[in-house]
Image: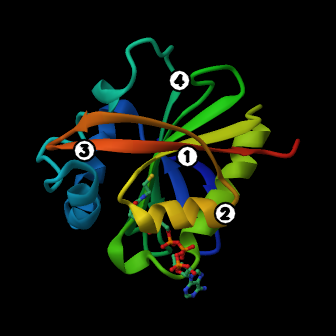
Amino acid sequence: MIQAAFQTADFTAESVEDNDTHVLQPLLDRCEDYHQIAYGRPALPDQARNIPRERPPTLAPGQGHLFALRDAQGGLAGMLEALRDFPAPEEWYIGLLLLAPEARGHGRGEAVLNAYEGYVRANGGRLLRVAVVEHNEVARRFWTRVGFQPEQWVGPIEQGLRWNRVLKMTKTLSPA
Ligand SMILES: CC(C)(COP(=O)(O)OP(=O)(O)OC[C@H]1O[C@@H](n2cnc3c(N)ncnc32)[C@H](O)[C@@H]1OP(=O)(O)O)[C@@H](O)C(=O)NCCC(=O)NCCS
């Protein structure tokens, strides 16, 4: 079933169930630039299908959230992957916010984040965290501009073909 979890002027965020994650593969394939930065290679052919298996093994059912961002025509324009109450209650972790290349640079990422913050607060989240790869300067600028602050450097950790240092960044959400 299709559920609209949150909305922006341009996009509707639809929940993607664990059995349906392959629908995101065309988007991952179109975002080779991001995968080169993060993993040193394009997306793998089964990468979308494997999203549920890549989550931390300690999660309870329902803690993994995955959204397809659809435009007014129903086209796949982006995705948001997150974990609720991870690693601690009321702390939510954004694994990936990814917009199709042609959707970037119009403030839509910020609009998605604003709408998602409302959804998180309404569901009891008080803090958002994201981990940004050191050399992903566009992303670091984005998260800083939308109010995230550096928390901690970790790594280098092995990601695909790369060893990355990553910066954990956090944003405290005002109460709903
Ligand atoms: C990171 C990401 C989600 C940001 O989304 P976005 O919609 O491009 O972000 P914004 O439009 O808010 O900002 C991008 C640029 O457009 C500019 N911009 C913002 N609003 C704009 C508008 N209305 N018109 C034109 N440009 C605008 C911003 O100033 C920004 O430029 P700057 O960073 O050089 O200052 C997107 O770039 C993306 O998917 N990147 C690849 C994946 C990735 O790295 N994700 C993060 C990993 S954790």
* 9 sits to left or right of 103: right
Q: Secondary structure at mark 1?
A: loop
Viewer-nearest residue: 33 or 144: 144
- Callout 4: 10 Å neighbours few (<14), some, many (20+)? few
Q: Which residue is mark 1?
A: 3
Instruction: Specify the amino acid type for callout 4.
Output: Gly
The earlier-in-sequence mark between 2 and 1 is 1
The earlier-in-sequence mark between 3 and 4 is 3
Q: In the image, residue 126 lies at what x, y percent? A: 77, 35
- Callout 3: 10 Å neighbours few (<14), some, many (20+)? some
The earlier-in-sequence mark between 3 and 2 is 3
Instruction: Specify the amino acid type for callout 1.
Output: Gln
Viewer-nearest residue: 59 or 162: 162
Of circles 3 and 2, the one toward us is 2
CA gap, disc 1 and disc 4: 15 Å
Instruction: Specify the amino acid type for callout 2.
Output: Val
CA gap, disc 3 and disc 2: 30 Å
Residue for point 66% across, 53% down? 148
CA gap, disc 2 and disc 4: 27 Å
Q: Which residue is mark 3?
A: 22
CA gap, disc 2 and disc 1: 26 Å
Q: Which residue is mark 4?
A: 62
Of circles 2 and 4, the one toward us is 2
* 76 sits to left or right of 14: left
